Amino acid sequence: MNRRQQQAITLLVCLCSTVLLAQQPKDTIHSLKEIVIDKNVYKDLIPVQTLDGKKLEKLNSYSVADALRYFSGVKIKDYGGMGGLKTVDVRNMGTHHVGVFYNGVQIGNAQNGIVDLGKFSLDNVETVKLYNGQRSTIFQSAKEYASASTVYIQTKKPVFQEGKDVNVSGKYKAGSIQLVNPSVRTDFKVSDHISTTISAEYMYSNGNYKFRQKKHNIDGSVAYDTIGHRLNSDIEAYRIENSWFGKTDKDNWQANLYYYQSDRGLPGAVIKKSDTTIETEKINERQGDKNFMAQAEWTRYVSDKYQFLLKGKYAYDEMHYLSRKTVGFQGEEVTYNPQFDNTFFQQEYFVSVSHLYKITPIWELSLATDLQYNKLNATRKGQGTPFAYPERFTFYTALATSVNLGKVKAQANVLGTFTKEKVRVNYQAPDRSIFTPSIFVNYKPFDSENLNIHTYYKQTYRLPTFNDLYYTQMGTANLKPENAKQVNFGFTYGKDFENSVWKEAHLSVESYYANITDKIIATPTSSMMRWMMTNLGKVQNYGIESSIGTTITPSKDWQLGVNVTYEYTVAKDKSTTLYGQPSYYGDQIPYAPWHSGSTVVNLDYKDWSLNYSFIYVGKRYNGNKNNITRNEIQPWYTHDLSLQKSFAWREYKFKGSIEANNLANQYYEVVTNFPMPGRNFRFTLSFEL
């Protein structure tokens, strides 16, 4: 056992011991068990994909990004290893059109607009939800209307058994690629109306795994087929969170403190240099992150007709990037770029006020106003080019209404977005303002059947990020904002069976069309830190998503659950130039597969659980735009298997699991020249006190 593992285990034991001391017997007031009746009269007008509770535990998922892979229409861009960047793309509209909300408040990144979902562990997550369009409720902040699709991450809320004021739970994970990952969580019941939770986690991996890289010539013959070991993909990270929850008859509030710190290597692209030599990856690119955010929300139920919602957030993000890049090539040590030593300091202030008024029992009206301020500073050693030091003021306002006519439910809104920017260089971004409307309609034809037919139209507006505009190695000051128009039509059907082996069955089918103008594409260069930004001009995107599943209970001890998703999509580059149609006109845009899907199978027997998952992504093309053989990325798929066992000792609960990921040991690339791990294993032991 190495020093890092010993430190991690010692930290976990110390935290648990401290909490156990707080569990000494004390005087308590016994009360009757609370009975909660959850009557969901107004079902989701907009279909939602959800993973929560035991479903999340059964998946071979380490982070939120891993869990989202099983949602229909979702593509994860993964740059390999435990420390690699992981971003989410829904319906090939791009990462920047996906709003990620953590406990109801959006995770922002004005610098590059990318949320690295690999930073968010599932150990403290209760629910992950994905909405295409937006949430069904109109009682939300104005910013929640601004994204083409939204991901909601809700952390675990404390639940106390009668007579208990403290809960303790923990996990210890170990596995291939030298993974060490202990975590601990403690819940305290402060009063009958207030509770708090503290969650801490440590993770280390050396990131060294074997890969195989195989490339073809234009004629289809094999250009080279080589095996290597991934370098500079290590990570060491810490996370600590403190959440507070409060609820009374008229008030509902929560507050969160979040801190994350990591030091990681940035794995470079593995590129063949000749018929006999491959780049040795002697790359010394490092990234250090420190992320802090404090946020809160408060809902006040003033009367049966009126309520308001107040949200606020402060976020501070520090990112240090260091590059001394050398490559051993054909026996020579060649330095091919200068040293970079950059530290970026990003701050965000956000406040939102929303009002909801019930005009009649079936008609509601809401008004939301948000104010956001973003600022980016930087220290860049050894570089003479002046930095822009951008600041951006954004004001959002949204007017929304919803009506429930029984079989027909509808929701409509218009969002106004107003921005003003200030920089310290000659270029000054223009002030921008735009109004974007949306309308959603749901129809339930039969009272006795759970069949819902729905459609929506939504327009969104995506501003270029600070990096898009001002970053010296890739910024393009003349980038235009993206405009996207979406149309969706689909249906969902669900059936519960009583007194039958079949417990339930569900089916959903969605068809969509999106027209994006001035689409901004970020294409990685030889480094994950330096990207090339371009406006494609116009992209037409359409496709079909489907999901079908069922639950079977042959006896009280056995339960089988199956869910299958499939998506067919076409995303064509319809850009034109001053000289007419380019050679790639009508081609599929980079990294958009035509076919993709997943399968999840869960088999439970008493305290045992066997879980199998399969993910498939079809043929795609890399960032070189032209759909030619040289630019093809071959399809990839993974088989994952896990076995879990729950057991109890005295009043304590334990669970052990063994996971085998990429069981077929397929060598594949999600992003060109960034190879993914082959077969790997993970072991987990968890407890509840």
Image: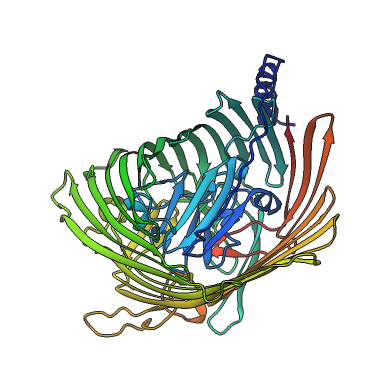
Q: How far across and how far down the image is residue 110, in percent?
A: 33, 48
Judge left or right: residue 162 versus residue 85: right
Labels in figure, total: 0
Image vertical order of residue 542 relative to residue 553, above or below: below
Q: Nearer the viewer, residue 388 or 513?
A: 513
Q: How far across and how far down the image is residue 576, in percent?
A: 28, 80
Q: Quadrant of the N terminus?
A: top right
Image vertical order of residue 105 relative to residue 632, above or below: above
Q: How far across and how far down the image is residue 162, in percent?
A: 69, 29
Judge left or right: residue 196 versus residue 135: right
Q: Quadrant of the C terminus?
A: top right
Image vertical order of residue 221 relative to residue 365, above or below: below
* Residue at 53 percent of width and 60 percent of height: 76
The image quarter containing residue 275 is: bottom right
| Residue 437 seen anywhere in this rendered image of the structure | yes
Q: How is the image coloured?
A: rainbow
* Residue at 59 percent of width and 82 percent of height: 220
Q: Nearer the viewer, residue 410 or 512?
A: 410
Q: Nearer the viewer, residue 576 or 38?
A: 38
Judge left or right: residue 383 versus residue 408: left
Q: How far across and how far down the image is residue 353, in percent?
A: 30, 43
* Residue at 57 percent of width and 61 percent of height: 278
